[in-house]
Amino acid sequence: MENALASIADVNQAERVLPVVHDLAASSFLYLRNIFKKKRTAATHVLVLMLSDEKRSKKPYALPVRYVPCRTLKDQFIRDLTKDLKVEMKKRDLHLTVDPDGRPVTRSPDPDVLHGLIVQLHELRYGADRMSLEDAITLVRGQLVPAGYDPYPFRRDTPESLLDKLRSIVATYKFRAIIDYWKERGVHFSTYLYGPEVDPVTGQERHDRGDHNHLFRRAASSIRQGRDPSLNYEAFDEVLMDSLSGLTHAALIGKRKQSFVDAERLISSHVVSSLRRSGHHDLAHHIEVLTQWHEAADGRGLSQLQRLQIQLPNVELCFG
């Protein structure tokens, strides 16, 4: 400073500058002391708060509304940081997608899918487990089947995608909702294997075949392939030689796989009688169960009570 003042040729000018320099030195000292008085840790991250609509179906999908440099985050800091933001959202009639506890609040597009599923997925992804979305979906889907069993693939012989797993979960919840719907109306499937449908217009019970033919052909195909190892399928050789059974070679081997007539020739009361005459009672009982189910579902001229009575032995077999 002295050297700087000495370089000024005009002494009068130096006298005017000197007080200003002293004031500048004092303020600079205070400024530098405030900088180094509290050593602050440099920020390593930037917290970005963004807003988006629930469906995120239109661009831009999310808008950044605040940037906060930070190194560590505490829960209270987040609450304080978002408090004024929530106030502004409330003024504009915007609804939050999380409750005060941090759990997701969303309007499910399908009322059959329980809200607890959304909360469970949220906790698996952002809780202690920190799972990926696909791992969380896989875990939840596995919990929907009994212990020791694997979920049936959504498409046979096709590798499942994440979308297929989500479809399987939704289909399971919708099926359970249908069961609960009928249970609330007195139809208990643990007691009755067949629940008549009520026409929404007339209010009377009705019977529709649905896809029974498709299921019946699949049952016949299962017999031809010998899916049940406890049964002796060689007994059909004797049935084929019995002229009273009505069984043909084409029906036995499934030459016409889509033939409903061949399926009825294989699963019929005449085949049951032939099996019993030749002493193959286990296989006869297996075919008889399918025959009774086919009669109850597709028989002509039967009342709802008669269909129920035909299925009663099958109910006792399935539920003891």
Image: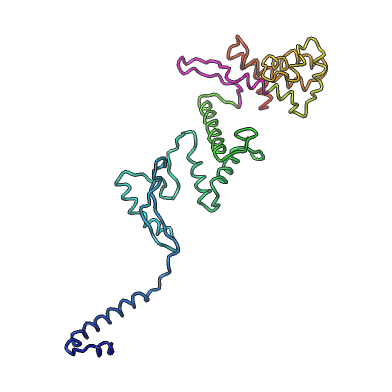
Please provide percent x and percent y for residue 281. Answer: 79, 20
Please provide percent x and percent y for residue 193. Answer: 61, 23
Q: Give the camera-side residue of 145 and 190.
A: 145
Q: Give the camera-side residue of 195 and 63.
A: 63
Which residue is depicted at the point 49% across and 17% down?
Answer: 199
Q: Does the magenta portion include 202?
A: yes
Residue 135 lies left or right of residue 200; in this view the side is right
Which residue is depicted at the point 31% across and 50% down?
Answer: 88
- Main SS, magenta region, reads loop
Which residue is depicted at the point 40% across and 55% down?
Answer: 48
In the image, residue 269 sits, relative to residue 30, either above or below, namely above
Q: Does the magenta portion include 99?
A: no
Q: Give the camera-side residue of 147 and 249.
A: 249
Rendered image quadrant of residue 108: top left
Query: For the C terminus, which image quadrant?
Result: top right
Please provide percent x and percent y for residue 258. Answer: 66, 19
Rendered image quadrant of residue 312: top right
In this figure, what is the number of numbered marks? 0
In the image, residue 257 sits, relative to residue 163, either above or below, namely above
Query: For the N terminus, which image quadrant?
Result: bottom left
What stretch of residues is rendered in magenta?
A: 190-218
Residue 132 lies left or right of residue 75; in this view the side is right
Please provide percent x and percent y for residue 275. Answer: 79, 17
Which residue is depicted at the point 74% across and 28% down?
Answer: 228
Q: Give the camera-side residue of 290 and 164.
A: 164
